[in-house]
Image (cartoon, grey):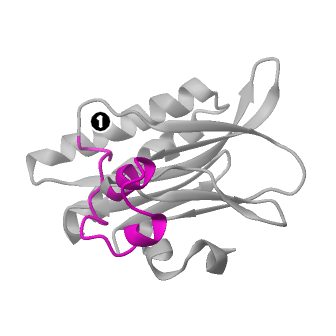
Amino acid sequence: NEDSFLAAPPFWIVADGMGGHAHGDLASRSAVEVFERARSAGAVSARAVLAAVRDANAAVLSLREDALSGTTLTGVAIVDIEGAGPHWMTFNVGDSRTYLWDGRRLEQQSIDHSAVQELVAAGVITPADAAAHPQRNVVTRALGAESEVEPDVWLVPLRGRQTFLLCSDGLRKELDDDEIA
Protein backbone atom coordinates (compact mmCIF):
# COMPACT_ATOMS: atom_id res chain seq x y z
CA ASN A 1 0.00 0.00 0.00
CA GLU A 2 1.49 3.29 -1.11
CA ASP A 3 -1.37 5.48 0.12
CA SER A 4 -1.06 8.32 2.61
CA PHE A 5 -3.81 10.52 3.98
CA LEU A 6 -4.57 13.53 6.12
CA ALA A 7 -7.87 13.95 7.95
CA ALA A 8 -7.47 17.11 10.00
CA PRO A 9 -9.50 20.26 9.41
CA PRO A 10 -9.36 22.19 7.19
CA PHE A 11 -7.86 19.45 4.97
CA TRP A 12 -8.90 15.94 4.07
CA ILE A 13 -6.68 14.38 1.41
CA VAL A 14 -5.70 11.01 -0.02
CA ALA A 15 -2.47 10.51 -1.96
CA ASP A 16 -1.83 7.24 -3.82
CA GLY A 17 1.88 6.74 -4.49
CA MET A 18 3.25 5.41 -7.76
CA GLY A 19 6.65 4.15 -8.81
CA GLY A 20 7.15 1.04 -6.72
CA HIS A 21 6.52 0.57 -3.03
CA ALA A 22 9.49 2.43 -1.55
CA HIS A 23 9.23 5.39 -3.90
CA GLY A 24 5.43 5.65 -4.15
CA ASP A 25 5.12 5.50 -0.37
CA LEU A 26 7.67 8.29 0.00
CA ALA A 27 5.98 10.40 -2.70
CA SER A 28 2.53 10.15 -1.12
CA ARG A 29 3.91 10.83 2.36
CA SER A 30 5.81 13.89 1.07
CA ALA A 31 2.64 15.32 -0.46
CA VAL A 32 0.72 14.83 2.81
CA GLU A 33 3.50 16.49 4.82
CA VAL A 34 3.16 19.64 2.70
CA PHE A 35 -0.54 19.83 3.59
CA GLU A 36 0.25 19.22 7.27
CA ARG A 37 2.56 22.25 7.20
CA ALA A 38 -0.08 24.34 5.36
CA ARG A 39 -2.62 23.31 8.00
CA SER A 40 -0.41 24.56 10.82
CA ALA A 41 -0.16 27.94 9.04
CA GLY A 42 -3.78 28.73 10.01
CA ALA A 43 -6.71 29.96 7.92
CA VAL A 44 -6.96 28.50 4.45
CA SER A 45 -7.90 30.32 1.28
CA ALA A 46 -8.43 28.85 -2.17
CA ARG A 47 -5.06 30.33 -3.18
CA ALA A 48 -3.40 28.65 -0.19
CA VAL A 49 -4.82 25.27 -1.28
CA LEU A 50 -3.48 25.76 -4.81
CA ALA A 51 -0.10 26.79 -3.36
CA ALA A 52 -0.06 23.61 -1.25
CA VAL A 53 -0.73 21.51 -4.37
CA ARG A 54 2.15 23.26 -6.17
CA ASP A 55 4.42 22.80 -3.13
CA ALA A 56 3.46 19.12 -2.90
CA ASN A 57 4.38 18.72 -6.57
CA ALA A 58 7.76 20.34 -5.91
CA ALA A 59 8.33 18.07 -2.90
CA VAL A 60 7.60 14.96 -4.97
CA LEU A 61 9.77 16.22 -7.84
CA SER A 62 12.67 16.65 -5.42
CA LEU A 63 12.53 12.88 -4.74
CA ARG A 64 13.20 12.03 -8.37
CA GLU A 65 16.97 12.22 -7.93
CA ASP A 66 16.91 8.67 -6.55
CA ALA A 67 14.18 7.11 -8.69
CA LEU A 68 11.06 7.91 -10.63
CA SER A 69 8.20 8.43 -8.21
CA GLY A 70 4.90 10.22 -8.14
CA THR A 71 1.53 10.29 -6.47
CA THR A 72 -2.06 11.05 -7.23
CA LEU A 73 -3.87 13.48 -4.94
CA THR A 74 -7.50 14.12 -4.17
CA GLY A 75 -8.84 16.28 -1.41
CA VAL A 76 -11.32 18.58 0.20
CA ALA A 77 -10.61 21.78 2.12
CA ILE A 78 -12.84 24.27 3.87
CA VAL A 79 -12.05 27.67 2.39
CA ASP A 80 -13.57 31.10 2.85
CA ILE A 81 -14.66 32.69 -0.41
CA GLU A 82 -14.76 36.45 -0.01
CA GLY A 83 -18.34 37.65 -0.18
CA ALA A 84 -19.72 34.10 -0.43
CA GLY A 85 -18.67 32.60 2.90
CA PRO A 86 -17.28 29.13 3.60
CA HIS A 87 -17.18 26.54 0.84
CA TRP A 88 -15.83 23.07 0.32
CA MET A 89 -13.00 23.19 -2.20
CA THR A 90 -12.46 19.84 -3.85
CA PHE A 91 -9.31 19.26 -5.87
CA ASN A 92 -7.58 16.41 -7.62
CA VAL A 93 -4.60 15.38 -9.69
CA GLY A 94 -4.63 11.82 -11.04
CA ASP A 95 -7.16 9.02 -10.71
CA SER A 96 -7.91 9.10 -6.99
CA ARG A 97 -11.46 10.30 -6.45
CA THR A 98 -13.65 12.51 -4.31
CA TYR A 99 -17.34 11.66 -3.99
CA LEU A 100 -20.10 13.67 -2.30
CA TRP A 101 -22.95 11.90 -0.47
CA ASP A 102 -25.91 14.16 0.33
CA GLY A 103 -27.89 11.52 2.21
CA ARG A 104 -29.73 10.38 -0.91
CA ARG A 105 -27.24 9.96 -3.71
CA LEU A 106 -23.54 9.64 -4.39
CA GLU A 107 -22.00 12.09 -6.86
CA GLN A 108 -18.45 11.87 -8.18
CA GLN A 109 -16.90 15.31 -7.63
CA SER A 110 -13.56 14.72 -9.33
CA ILE A 111 -12.65 13.68 -12.85
CA ASP A 112 -10.03 10.98 -13.37
CA HIS A 113 -6.88 12.06 -15.14
CA SER A 114 -6.39 8.81 -17.00
CA ALA A 115 -6.07 7.47 -20.53
CA VAL A 116 -9.38 5.60 -20.28
CA GLN A 117 -11.26 8.65 -18.96
CA GLU A 118 -10.07 10.57 -22.01
CA LEU A 119 -11.46 7.77 -24.22
CA VAL A 120 -14.76 7.80 -22.30
CA ALA A 121 -15.00 11.61 -22.58
CA ALA A 122 -14.35 11.38 -26.34
CA GLY A 123 -17.10 8.77 -26.72
CA VAL A 124 -14.66 6.12 -27.96
CA ILE A 125 -15.47 3.66 -25.14
CA THR A 126 -18.17 3.37 -22.48
CA PRO A 127 -17.56 3.62 -18.73
CA ALA A 128 -18.20 -0.14 -18.55
CA ASP A 129 -15.50 -0.74 -21.20
CA ALA A 130 -13.07 1.42 -19.21
CA ALA A 131 -13.07 -1.02 -16.29
CA ALA A 132 -11.43 -3.74 -18.40
CA HIS A 133 -9.47 -1.59 -20.85
CA PRO A 134 -5.75 -2.47 -21.16
CA GLN A 135 -4.78 1.17 -20.44
CA ARG A 136 -6.98 1.47 -17.32
CA ASN A 137 -3.90 2.00 -15.12
CA VAL A 138 -2.36 4.78 -17.23
CA VAL A 139 -2.53 8.06 -15.31
CA THR A 140 -2.21 11.24 -17.39
CA ARG A 141 -1.62 13.70 -14.54
CA ALA A 142 0.17 13.21 -11.20
CA LEU A 143 2.30 15.04 -8.66
CA GLY A 144 5.94 14.59 -9.62
CA ALA A 145 5.26 14.00 -13.32
CA GLU A 146 5.91 17.55 -14.57
CA SER A 147 7.47 20.73 -13.17
CA GLU A 148 4.04 22.41 -13.23
CA VAL A 149 0.87 20.77 -11.99
CA GLU A 150 -2.69 21.77 -12.76
CA PRO A 151 -5.29 20.36 -10.37
CA ASP A 152 -8.95 20.30 -11.20
CA VAL A 153 -10.89 22.37 -8.64
CA TRP A 154 -14.56 22.67 -7.69
CA LEU A 155 -16.26 24.86 -5.09
CA VAL A 156 -19.26 23.45 -3.24
CA PRO A 157 -21.27 25.65 -0.85
CA LEU A 158 -21.51 24.29 2.70
CA ARG A 159 -25.09 23.28 3.33
CA GLY A 160 -27.23 20.55 4.80
CA ARG A 161 -25.98 17.03 5.02
CA GLN A 162 -22.73 16.61 3.08
CA THR A 163 -20.36 13.69 3.45
CA PHE A 164 -17.27 13.34 1.31
CA LEU A 165 -15.56 10.07 0.46
CA LEU A 166 -11.97 10.30 -0.73
CA CYS A 167 -10.39 7.16 -2.15
CA SER A 168 -7.59 5.83 -4.29
CA ASP A 169 -8.29 3.73 -7.37
CA GLY A 170 -8.05 0.63 -5.15
CA LEU A 171 -11.61 1.14 -3.86
CA ARG A 172 -13.26 1.89 -7.17
CA LYS A 173 -11.54 -1.07 -8.84
CA GLU A 174 -13.26 -3.32 -6.29
CA LEU A 175 -16.66 -1.61 -6.05
CA ASP A 176 -18.81 0.22 -8.56
CA ASP A 177 -20.49 3.52 -7.65
CA ASP A 178 -23.74 1.82 -6.59
CA GLU A 179 -21.84 -0.44 -4.19
CA ILE A 180 -19.88 2.53 -2.83
CA ALA A 181 -23.14 4.43 -2.23
Above or below 81: residue 79: below
> For the magenta stretch, what is the residue range?
116-145
Per the image, is 59 magenta?
no
Residue 131 lies in the magenta-colored region: yes
* Residue 29 seen anywhere in this rendered image of the structure: no
Amino acid type, callout 1: Ala
- View extreme (right): residue: 160
Query: Where residue 58 sits in the image (x, y, percent)?
Result: 29, 35
By secondary structure, the bulk of the magenta-drawn segment is best described as loop
* Drawn side of residue 99 relative to residue 124, left or right: right
Q: Residues within 10 Å of mark 1 (few under 14, many from 20)?
A: many
Q: Is residue 94 left or right of residue 133?
A: right
Q: Quadrant of the N terminus?
A: bottom left
Q: Residue at x 44, y 76 (%)?
A: 173
**Residue furthest left as drawn:** 66
Question: Mark 1 — residue?
Answer: 58
